[in-house]
Amino acid sequence: MTSLRFFVRPLLVRPLLVRPVCIAALALSFGAGAASAETILFVGNSFTFGAGSAAWHYRPDSVDDLNGEGVGGVPAIFKRFTEQAGLNYDVALETGGGRSLGWHLKERRGKIDRAWDQVVLQEYSTLDAAKPGDATRTIADTKALATLFRARNPKVSIRLTATWSRPDLVYRPGSPWSGRPIGAMAVDLRHAYDRAAKAAGPVVKDVVPVGQAFTCAIRTGVADGDPYDGITPGQVDLWTDDHYHASAAGYYLEALMLFASITGRDPRTLGANETAAADLGVAPTLAVALQTVAHRATATDGACGR
């Protein structure tokens, strides 16, 4: 009410002189507020949009789904975190189930080719669907996408999401990770993303060790490492029923890792009353435990999950 009286009084005395100044000041004020939002684009597949869980269509109105599919996913959880932290991010996403980075570059270039302040890229879960574990295409496509985004904004910051081990590939025969420890796949993927980041150059600011955070949660007793033999009481299953995609808790942990990397904030500051956890059915005690895992995985650059 004080600010309104400040403008009204001069208008009554000198309307012709003050009105344009007031309008200009208001326009500048609103323009400055809009400009302060950090733009961020998430590019990925089902591991980004949260398939198989409540994350999939979580708060879709809070983000801009460039494909118009009503997706909220991990980007919307991230957005909710930033709101609670008092940060201003304009979040967009472009996702496609089972798609590679190369597919987005080829088929969705028209949607993503614009200036962004930050970009998060997530590759197919085995890197190359036809050659699981082969990073050749991931490296080339990451470099091409980095070139694309840098051309639009030379100051863009890009992050790569190194994803998790898949129990369906670890505990069943026929994959490069069959019979190996549950954390091995996550480490292999991390190494591949590190190579892609190096090839793309300094525009890639971080490889976010989400998969190693999953392993860290297992090693600290927060999560069960083998969903095929049942879930140990007091522990959480980070995967959904297909033992491939993440559960709500798994996507929550992914979003925590991205929040820590992108904002530089300690995820533990979100606390037990964090609202996205409540919305997704993640109990307060589990939310705090996952926040602690995310802090540890971030602080050790994934070493707690090696």
Image (tube, rainbow, N blue to C red):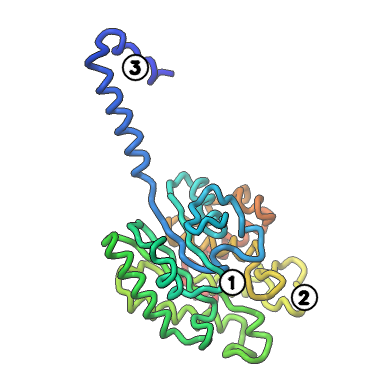
Q: Earlier in the sequence, mark 1 or mark 3?
A: 3
Instruction: Give residue 63's position: percent from left, percent from top.
Output: 50, 51
Label 3 crowd (10 A; few <14 / some 14-19 / many >=20):
few
The CA span between labels 2 and 3 is: 66 Å
Instruction: Give residue 88's position: percent from left, percent from top.
Output: 43, 46
Q: Mark 2 or mark 3: which is in front?
A: 3
The reply to whether callout 1 and callout 3 are in contact (CB within 8 Å) is no
The CA span between labels 2 and 1 is: 17 Å
The reply to whether callout 2 and callout 1 are in contact (CB within 8 Å) is no
Label placed on residue 230: 2
Q: Is residue 42 left or right of residue 49?
A: left
Q: Residue at x 64, y 75 (%)?
A: 244
In the figure, residue 265 lies in which quadrant?
Answer: bottom left
Residue of label 3? 6
Quadrant including the N terminus: top left
Inspect this view and state whether residue 224 appears: yes
* Residue type at the position of mark 3: Phe
The CA span between labels 1 and 3 is: 55 Å
Instruction: Give residue 52's position: percent from left, percent from top.
Output: 66, 65
Pick the front one: 12 or 284: 12
The reply to whether callout 2 and callout 3 are in contact (CB within 8 Å) is no
* Residue type at the position of mark 1: Phe
Label placed on residue 271: none
Pick the front one: 304 or 49: 49
Q: Residue at x 54, y 54 (%)?
A: 76
Label 2 crowd (10 A; few <14 / some 14-19 / many >=20):
few
Give the structural element (helix, strand or loop) at label 1. Answer: helix
Q: Earlier in the sequence, mark 2 or mark 1?
A: 1
Q: Mark 1 or mark 3: which is in front?
A: 3
In this rendering, is residue 239 above or below 152? below
Label placed on residue 214: 1
In the figure, residue 285 lies in which quadrant?
Answer: bottom right
